[in-house]
Image: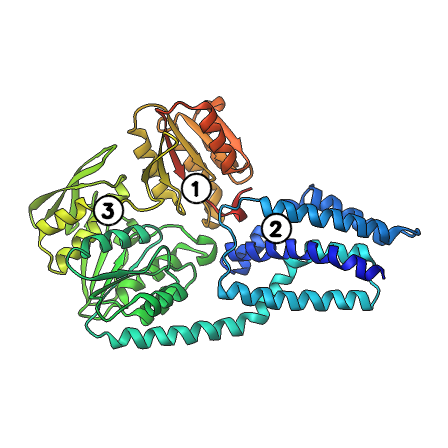
């Protein structure tokens, strides 16, 4: 009888914490390494209401008195419905996306949980221990579920990828452009699309669809015989992924935007990153064209093993085939000139930041190589749309925001601060810091903080643990401690802005980490 009464409370606890475990596994890209790192830092392992409840359940499991199980059931109901209410009202930065993979995971997860609870009841495991398993068990069970599902997920991916390859190979006149790099890929992709779309019917991978499955979906759902150009962003955070995508997509034009320590925790060292990114040039056909950024030292020093044509772009490197000069930033955007073969061409754009000038420069070089007249390129560049969450100027509640919230890195974060420095009025930065930098993460965050003085007047840090190196960098650089405020959530930081700052302030939003990293 007690089992029947206990089961609904157990079900609620299991649903709440299983959903959270699956959500965090998704936010960590279904990768064991990233998920384990999050799990070890999970705040609920530390002193918290959940931990207190679990300790009480464990104590009751080994206690011996008449109403022990009744107390466990009552606490399970109270805890279950409290955390269900909390979960329903929690505003996630990135909510759980119910993809086909997640739906399959939920089904398998549910089967395992049902089996475990049946065994627990059959073998008369104390209710307290069953309740603890409902709270913490899902975070460990995700490993077993993911391993069991791994062959199925690989088979599903390969099936759909084969269909995409067949469709792609049937369009033999399609011009394909592959874009990779440690950062800047999505910006360059959007810029190239905007420039080429003036002259060609162009398709690009949407949003950040830069994985094999994202590219597969783009080809299967959006690519039509009428398209003349396909601009494909290619992401990688493991060795072999660019090589795979180059064999899959087979671009005739390859672009490497930049190389840096992004995803150092999964690539393990810079040599792996450099070699993998440069496969976008080395695996081009011999009649293909590669475009590289030689302001980037890692790219400039790399010896390319391919006889294809390689075109260089740069701002600071005088040897570049296409070089941006005379750069001026203002609230409406930027102006600059491009020198090519001894001739300079003037350009205007609504985009901000030196790295965006470099991104545009790659688009200019590609358009010129593809035969578009320079005067048409100038017009197209002037019409480039602001790129969402990448130094995008916004007006929100009367305040001016510079939104650089997408996956910031050491280079773009400093460029963002340089843009902020040029703004009138009070200059404010809101940031949770940088991630995916492996063992160098603390050092880069500290350097990020040290770069802020003179560029920001007020610093709002989100997440006291992760932003500690930024705080240390600020203090060591002599920044006024009273002008550094630390918040637990982005929402709290925004509330402070709206309550305390004048509307002549310019607020830089630098990076927008998923909930798994906000600590």
Few, some or many residues within 10 Å of mark 2 (<14, 14–19, 20+): few
Q: Secondary structure at mark 2?
A: helix
Counting residues from the start of the chain, the first of labels 3 and 2 encountered is 2
In the drawing, does residue 439 fall left or right of residue 205? right
Q: Is residue 168 visible?
A: yes
Q: Nearer the viewer, residue 165 or 86?
A: 86
Identify the residue at image location x=37%, y=60%: 210
Which percent across, then down, holds residue 58?
80, 51
- Residue at label 1? 444
Which percent across, then down, holds residue 487?
53, 33
Few, some or many residues within 10 Å of mark 3 (<14, 14–19, 20+): many
Question: Which label was assigned to residue 40?
Answer: 2
Q: Vertical placement of 253 versus 40: above or below?
A: below
Identify the residue at image location x=22%, y=61%: 202
3D distance between C-alphas at marks 3 and 2: 39 Å
Counting residues from the start of the chain, the first of labels 1 and 2 encountered is 2
Q: Vertical placement of 340 versus 282: above or below?
A: above
Which percent across, then down, holds residue 229?
22, 64
Which percent across, then down, holds residue 255?
26, 58
Few, some or many residues within 10 Å of mark 1 (<14, 14–19, 20+): many
In the drawing, does residue 130 fall left or right of residue 185? right
């Amino acid at each position: 009888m007690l089992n029947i009464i206990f089961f609904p409370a157990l079900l609620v606890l299991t649903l709440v914490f299983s959903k959270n475990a699956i959500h965090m596994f998704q936010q960590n890209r279904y990768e064991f390494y990233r998920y384990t790192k999050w799990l070890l830092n999970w705040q609920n392992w530390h002193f918290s209401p959940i931990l207190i409840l679990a300790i009480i359940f464990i104590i009751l499991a080994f206690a011996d008195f008449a109403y022990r199980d009744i107390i466990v059931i009552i606490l399970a109901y109270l805890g279950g419905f409290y955390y269900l209410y909390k979960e329903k009202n929690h505003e996630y930065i990135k909510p759980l996306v119910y993809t086909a993979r997640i739906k399959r995971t939920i089904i398998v997860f549910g089967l395992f949980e049902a089996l475990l609870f049946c065994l627990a009841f059959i073998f008369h495991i104390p209710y307290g221990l069953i309740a603890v398993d409902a709270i913490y068990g899902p975070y460990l069970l995700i490993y077993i579920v993911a391993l069991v599902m791994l062959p199925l997920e690989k088979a599903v991916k390969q099936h759909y990828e084969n269909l995409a390859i067949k469709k792609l190979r049937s369009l033999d006149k399609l011009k394909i452009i592959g874009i990779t790099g440690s950062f800047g890929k999505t910006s360059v992709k959007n810029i190239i699309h905007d420039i080429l779309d003036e002259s060609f019917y162009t398709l690009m991978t949407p949003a950040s669809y830069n994985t094999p499955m994202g590219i597969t979906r783009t080809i299967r759902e959006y690519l039509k015989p009428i398209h003349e150009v396909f601009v494909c962003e290619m992401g990688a955070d493991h060795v072999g992924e660019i090589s795979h995508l180059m064999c899959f997509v087979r671009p005739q034009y390859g672009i490497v935007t930049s190389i840096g320590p992004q995803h150092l925790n999964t690539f393990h060292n810079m040599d792996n990153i450099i070699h993998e990114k440069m496969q976008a040039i080395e695996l081009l056909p011999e009649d293909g064209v590669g475009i590289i950024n030689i302001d980037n030292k890692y790219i400039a020093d790399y010896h390319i093993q391919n006889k294809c044509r390689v075109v260089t772009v740069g701002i600071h490197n005088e040897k570049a085939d296409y070089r941006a000069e005379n750069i001026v930033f203002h609230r409406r955007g930027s102006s600059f000139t491009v020198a090519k073969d001894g001739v300079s061409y003037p350009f205007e754009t609504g985009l901000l930041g030196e790295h965006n000038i470099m991104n545009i420069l790659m688009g200019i070089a590609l358009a010129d190589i593809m035969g578009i007249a320079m005067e048409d390129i100038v017009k197209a560049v002037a019409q480039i749309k602001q790129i969402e969450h990448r130094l995008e100027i916004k007006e929100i509640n009367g305040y001016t925001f510079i939104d650089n919230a997408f996956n910031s890195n050491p280079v773009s974060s400093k460029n963002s601060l340089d843009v902020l420095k040029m703004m009138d009025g009070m200059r404010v930065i809101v940031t949770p810091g940088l991630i995916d930098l492996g063992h160098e993460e603390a050092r880069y965050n500290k350097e990020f903080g040290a770069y802020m003085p003179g560029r920001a007047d007020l610093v709002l840090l989100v997440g006291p643990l992760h932003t500690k190196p930024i705080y240390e960098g600020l203090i060591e650089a002599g920044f006024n401690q009273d002008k550094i405020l630390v918040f637990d959530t982005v929402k709290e930081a925004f509330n402070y802005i709206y309550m305390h700052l004048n509307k002549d302030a310019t607020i830089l939003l630098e990076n927008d980490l998923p909930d798994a990293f906000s600590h």
